[in-house]
Amino acid sequence: MKNIQFYASLIILSIFLINCSSDDDDVVTPLATPEPDPVATVDLEIENFIWKGLNLYYLWQQDVPDLSDTKFTTQIELDAYLAPYDGKHEELFENLLHNEDEFSWIVDDYNVLDQQLRGGVSSTTGMDIRLSYIDSNSPNLVAFVRYILPNSAADDKNIKRGDFFQKVDGQQLTINNYFALLFESESYTIELTDYNNGVFTNTGTEILLIKEELAENPVHIVKTIDNGSDKVGYIMYNQFLSTYDSDLNTAFGTLKAEGVSDLVLDLRYNSGGQVSSAINLSSMITGQFENEVFSVQRWNDKVNDYFTAEYGSDYFTYFFSNSMESGEAINNLNMNKVIILTSSSTASSSELVINGLDPYIEVILIGDTTVGKTWGSLTLYDSPDYTNKDDINPNHTWAMQPLVVETQNSVGYNNKTGFIPDYELLEYASNLGVLGDPNEPLLSKALEILDPSTKYGLDKLDEELIGHEYFTDSKKESAIGNNMFIELKDGFIK
């Protein structure tokens, strides 16, 4: 019954998008019926979808003058405002964003967006790469491989973690051409590069890579490591995808069966994903906090006030759980401490896990400072309630992914500047090591913290590579990049 009430309420709310009356701020007046007007000859259905969707859900709606409920009194006035943006959908969207917002975006094909956000499916060569400046005084970039997806094009060509390249299709990578060469092209040729004594040298070895549709299982590595007298569980988890929550739960079940006493969670390449998966992961790590508050959301004033009045103050509160939405019991480890490996790519839902666990257990961070993204987004479609594809407008496939919520943990804290590691240990291309190997620098440090009597052999860091400043990476350039997104299901927020 609550689901039906929510859906009906949401449709009603969506209709009343504009213009609170001046004598009663609580009364919302619908747009007046359009009169014949020259603007009506212009097709503005996409522009109307953009404005109305943001007017309803955008986190900063009340702070953007052109999204104000009192900005337009009739549909004709709104259409007159939108008319100059006819066919300029991205420009309209960008002009309606708050200056604090660096993460909202719009796409022209929601099918591709849904595949990436919810299924982890993308067109890829299988290389997860980082791009860094070769020299601080130059726009030139060098790429190195962080990891390879199994059974991908790059895997077939025997490309491995730590490989360098700076030329693509014969062109030097720069801050101006990298996106077109690597992320817009469906195929490209890289030339491998050696690094010696501070100098990058092209080898002449060229490899053609052709992208293919591939689903990445984010549960990348699961293993148990003997560390002195203890067993340490290690999981490298690279994206929060509910499609693979059962796989993640199985991984925790394996660690639990093997009797691990400690856990190292590797989120260094995890830039975000679904909030529901972050709650499930945090519940797997713990288990002793069922029904305790994990996080609280703040929406814009209009949405927050409306649904709080309808469903109470707990409506936007998430709780630890001992079961997933499918009903599958969670394999929890009941940890009182977790070590999390981070980097400058660790963002969003990864930070939600860090922040949500912190009031309850000891959270030790090793690596680099995280991004500092405390906001979550929502996919908006051109449909009656904007949040699902029922009765979606068949005339176009545009969709938006605007920021709609700000998250806090159970004690009201969030972090917009990033979580600073307890042990700073940056990842350098000269000393990447093998992921999951006890000698890999970040994992080795974690094992040493857990048991100082066990030390693994670390190679000396190449100090000359410290100056190669981070520019971007594969995850940041993808649809999932630095994203924490909310899912609506059956008319209610998960």
Image (cartoon, helix red, strand yellow):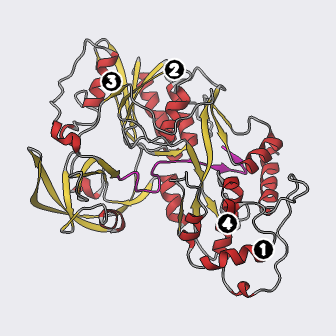
Does 50 appear above or below 472? below
Looking at the image, which is closer to me, 480 or 149?
A: 480
Instruction: Identify residue for label 1.
Output: 75
> SS class of the residue under badge 3?
helix
Tell me if residue 101 comes above or below residue 312 in the rendering.
below
Q: Find the magenta span and give its range.
A: 473-494
Nearest to the eye among marks 4 and 2: give it.
4
Task: Please give the residue where the numbered disc 3 appears in the rendered image.
Answer: 446
- Is residue 406 toward the left or the right of residue 369 in the image? right
Lower sequence index among marks 3 and 1: 1
| Mark nearer the N terminus (4 vs 1) | 4
Q: x and y percent of residue 368 in the render?
A: 35, 35
Indicate left or right for 121 with 87 as reference. left
Q: In the drawing, does residue 196 fall left or right of residue 69?
A: left
Q: CA distance from mark 3 to mark 1?
A: 60 Å
Callout 1: few (<14), some (14-19), or many (20+) C-alpha neighbours within 10 Å? some
Residue 243: x and y, percent?
51, 47
Question: What is the distance, in whole Å, between disc 4 and disc 2 at their CAs?
Answer: 43 Å
Kind of residue at badge 3: Ala
The residue at 25%/56% (across/down) is 154
Mark 3 closeness class: few <14, some 14–19, many ≥20 residues within 10 Å: many
| Position of residue 114 measured from the top left corner of the image (x, y, whole percent) | 53, 59
Is 284 magenta? The answer is no
From the image, state whether disc 1 or disc 2 is nearer to you. 1
Q: CA distance from mark 3 to mark 2?
A: 17 Å
Gap between marks 3 and 4, in whole Å?
A: 48 Å
> From what the image shows, is residue 247 above or below residue 44?
above
Q: Amino acid at mark 4?
A: Trp
Under tag 2, what secondary structure? loop
Q: Is residue 492 one of those drawn in magenta?
A: yes
The residue to which callout 4 is attached is 51
Q: Residue at x 41, y 17 (%)?
A: 261
